[in-house]
Amino acid sequence: MLHRRRFVIRCVLASLLVLAPVLRADPLVRIGTSDWAPYVEQERGDGGALVRLVTAVFAAAGYRAEFFFYPWDRNVLMLQQGTLDAIMPYSCSPMRLDYGICSDPLVRGEVVLFHRRGRVFDWTRIEDLRPYRIGTTHGYSYGPQFDRALQDGLLEIEQHSKEDTALRLLELGRIDLHPQDRAVGYAMLHRLFPGERRITHHPRYLNTEPLRLLFRRDDPAARQLLERFNTALADFARRGELKRLQEALYSGNADHWQPKR
């Protein structure tokens, strides 16, 4: 089991620290996440692009954010138990609405199918994927059609707990396909296999939908927190910050994006 690691991002105006003592700390929001570069990166001091965004949004709403890194399925369990206030970044899939309520969109992700360059591969329907060995990650949603086919046992699936296992197996030729967010997949490939890559992706989307925060369902305090987060997030959207971040993610420059307050 992974050791828990965390970092706290404190968002306090420097002028307040100089001019006046802090009489009361901003309320704390505990957020579960996991490594998913370039969106979230545990080894970075600032946590990655979405951690920077969410921290700034909560600061604008009067909260400070603390991030905990766990496996994706453990994040869900801890949210359900009330140990965490929110988890991110998740898609708002139907099965997640059983236990969570979703924030407004942060950015839009594209789930594509990665495969080795030497494989002649094409598809138009989920049924076309039946002949292939597909590697997935526990706790992921790949879109309603793929998730339904997985639950119904229609596909040959190997599930793994570690984020990069499927790409390693794909490189070795032990699986045929790996569904993954396009930006995340190429960030992992760059880290795992620097230089010439033998893996590419099919141009057809498996799924495309926004990434969001998930708050605990049937909790009045969580609903209030969600409303305040969404209000502050809408201001960032009006000022073009979410558009700038999306463009940075698509161009591979997310590391250099900083939210303007």
Image (spheres, rainbow, N blue to C red):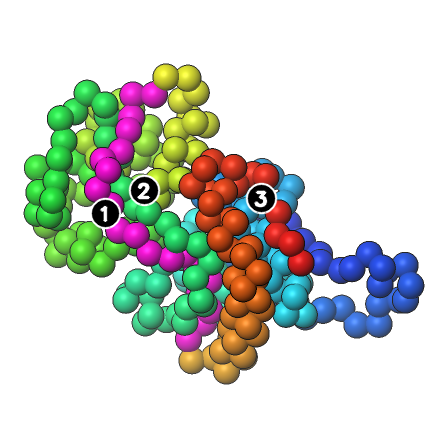
Residue 4 coordinates in the image, percent (x, y): 55, 48
Which is more N-terminal, label 1 or label 2?
Answer: 2
Amino acid, disc 1: Leu
For residue 176, which quarter of the picture?
Answer: top left
Residue at horizontal 20%, vertical 38%?
Answer: 134
Q: Which mark is residue 180?
A: 2
Residue 65 coordinates in the image, percent (x, y): 62, 60
- Residue 153, compared with residue 61, is above or below; it is above
Is residue 118 among the parts visible in the rendering? yes
Secondary element under disc 2, as helix, strand or loop, is strand
Of discs 2 and 3, which sits in the foreground? 3
The magenta region covers 197-217
Looking at the picture, tell me which residue is in the foreground, 191 or 203.
203
Secondary element under disc 1, as helix, strand or loop, is loop
For residue 11, which quarter of the picture?
Answer: bottom right
Say whether residue 51 is magenta. Answer: no
Question: Which quadrant does the C terminus fall into?
Answer: bottom right
Name the residue tied to disc 1.
206
Amino acid, disc 2: Gln
For label 2, the crowd category at 10 Å Cα-Cα, with few meaning under 14, some 14 to 19 and many 20 or more, is many
Q: How many marks?
A: 3
Residue at horizontal 33%, vertical 28%?
Answer: 168
Residue at horizontal 90%, vertical 66%?
Answer: 20
- Residue 120, compared with residue 260, is above or below; it is above
Looking at the picture, tell me which residue is in the foreground, 24 or 56.
56
Give the spatial CA distance, label 2 vs label 1. Answer: 9 Å
For label 1, the crowd category at 10 Å Cα-Cα, with few meaning under 14, some 14 to 19 and many 20 or more, is many
For label 3, the crowd category at 10 Å Cα-Cα, with few meaning under 14, some 14 to 19 and many 20 or more, is some
Name the residue tied to disc 3.
257
Horizontally, is 96 left or right of 41 in the view?
left
Give the spatial CA distance, label 2 vs label 3. Answer: 23 Å
Of discs 2 and 1, which sits in the foreground? 1
